[in-house]
Image (cartoon, rainbow, N blue to C red):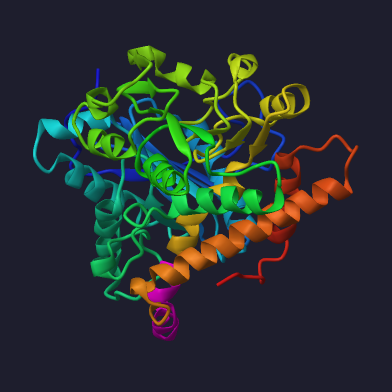
């Protein structure tokens, strides 16, 4: 049964970092800290916080809300955030948190989400090594609420402890409104177009699994460049049209309560309920998984009919699946923490602007309320990493190394050099 009554108070309790919910511990180092967020009156678990690594700085990572959340999922995502922040040369480590709640229940009562975020803000305040950000089912208003709680508790609006990815009017960098994660996906695809004479965006067939804030952002950008968005999905429906879906209609439909289920344009195929994941198997040149982890596994790897995969979601597949796709199917996956880092770069800029007025002035001087500076930084960072990894793979040709392995090596090298920053 779904939880519908929000606790008056939540607290974060430390968990052992030894082992994990699976049968054996991962080969990686265990996270530095794990917490479960509980209702002290009932003992019910309402969420988790994982601080994976703070060698480069406090752990930065989003808060996601999902009914079936597990500490294992948060651990994996926190590790990805370590690699993401390190590869992007940001002064942050990796962390992640989640609230175990069905976001569909927020409509049951006015103010329910605000109460839950408020209780969560109080619970995580003692964890001074964590900076939260938006993620699945959270937004800039939620992070603003957490930031304000920190400000009230500390008595200083220029702290670096609170949440990032806040509204521009409050001094933040709005990750979703500016489409920054989508911009990093676009940057990676545009860079590939520049270095691969056999690849171009114009005319490319694109399938986007998860047409939400990130999926819609990259879809809009690619459509403007002449790509055909032939497939799109959300939790309500998956749509496929070989001649291309109407992007404007997709954007209108996704704001409807029925989501893409209300799309009125021409389609060749529609999938509903538990069948929406079939869209991943649609023929396309570019596949963009932009939803939950493990969308691509051994169960569907043989049925994919795409040319390249750009991972908008975190951990949409694992290393073994990607190895099989690249070496047996000739489908190259561009790793999540390399190509979807736009959000954390925006958050990093915001945190520094909050603490450094001269830096804020420099960002704003670039124009467009600082968005130009942030987008340029994202493009430069993503493009440089794509070029570096591609060059290294060519130099190590024949060594049986896939893109994710080389990307991880780059991130771990930078994790050992925390004094090098891109800001």
**Relative image position of residue 311 (x, y in whole percent):** 55, 39
Q: At which x and y percent is residue 359?
A: 45, 81
Q: What is the magenta segment's predominant secondary structure?
A: helix
44 vs 398, left or right, is left
Question: Hey, which quadrant is residue 402 in on the image?
Answer: top right
The C terminus sits in image quarter: bottom right
In the figure, is residue 301 to the left or right of 295? right
Q: Residue furthest right?
A: 398
| Point 25% across, 61% down: residue | 149
Q: Is residue 140 above or below residue 401?
A: below
Apparent side of residue 148 relative to residue 59 in the rendered image (left or right): left
Q: Per the image, is 253 magenta?
A: no
Residue at 56% x, 66% y: name it.
Answer: 91
- Res. 32 in view: no
- Which sits in the foreground, 345 or 16? 345
Of 18 and 332, nearer the camera is 332
Residue 23 in view (yes/no): yes
On the image, the x and y values in percent for residue 164 come to 37, 60
Residue stretch rendered in magenta on the structure: 349-363
What residue is drawn where x is 18% and y is 34%? 106
* Residue 359 within the segment the image draws in magenta: yes
Residue 1 occupies quadrant: top left
Decide which of 56, 422 is in the foreground and name it.
422
Q: Residue 228: image x %, image y %? A: 46, 35
């Amino acid at each position: 049964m779904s939880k519908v009554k929000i606790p008056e108070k939540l607290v974060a309790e430390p968990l052992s970092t030894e082992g994990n919910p699976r049968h054996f511990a991962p080969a990686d180092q265990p996270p530095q800290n794990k917490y479960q967020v509980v209702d002290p009156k009932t003992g019910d678990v309402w969420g988790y916080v994982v601080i994976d690594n703070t060698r480069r700085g406090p752990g930065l990572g989003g808060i996601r809300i999902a009914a079936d959340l597990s500490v294992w999922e948060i651990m994996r995502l926190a590790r990805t955030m370590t690699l993401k922040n390190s590869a992007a040369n940001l002064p942050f480590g990796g962390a992640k948190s989640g609230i175990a709640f069905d976001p569909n229940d927020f409509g049951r009562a006015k103010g329910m989400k605000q109460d839950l975020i408020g209780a969560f803000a109080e619970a995580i305040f003692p964890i001074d090594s964590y900076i939260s950000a938006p993620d699945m089912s959270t937004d800039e208003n939620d992070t603003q609420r957490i930031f304000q709680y920190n400000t009230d508790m500390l008595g200083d609006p220029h702290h670096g402890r609170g949440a990032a990815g806040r509204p521009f009017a409050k001094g933040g960098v709005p990750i979703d409104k500016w489409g920054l994660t989508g911009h990093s996906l676009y940057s990676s695809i545009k860079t590939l177009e520049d270095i691969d004479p056999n690849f171009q965006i114009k005319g490319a067939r694109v399938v986007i699994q998860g047409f939400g804030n990130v999926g819609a952002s990259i879809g809009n950008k690619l459509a403007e460049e002449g790509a055909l968005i032939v497939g799109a999905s959300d939790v309500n429906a998956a749509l496929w049209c070989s001649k291309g879906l109407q992007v404007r209609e997709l954007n209108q439909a996704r704001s409807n309560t029925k989501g893409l289920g209300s799309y009125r344009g021409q389609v060749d195929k529609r999938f509903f309920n538990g069948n929406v994941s079939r869209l991943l198997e649609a023929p396309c040149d570019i596949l963009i998984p932009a939803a939950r982890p493990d969308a691509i596994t051994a169960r569907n790897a043989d049925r994919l009919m795409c040319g390249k995969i750009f991972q908008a979601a975190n951990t949409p597949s694992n290393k073994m699946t990607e190895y099989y796709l690249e070496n047996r199917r000739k489908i190259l996956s561009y790793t999540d923490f390399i190509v979807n880092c736009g959000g954390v770069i925006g958050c990093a800029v915001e945190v520094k602007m909050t603490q450094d007025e001269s830096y804020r002035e420099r960002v704003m001087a670039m124009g467009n309320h600082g968005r130009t500076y942030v987008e340029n930084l994202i493009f430069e960072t993503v493009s440089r990493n794509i070029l570096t990894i591609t060059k290294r793979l060519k130099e190590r040709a024949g060594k049986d190394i896939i893109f994710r392995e080389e990307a991880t090596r780059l991130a771990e090298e930078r994790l050992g050099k925390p004094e090098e920053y891109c800001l």
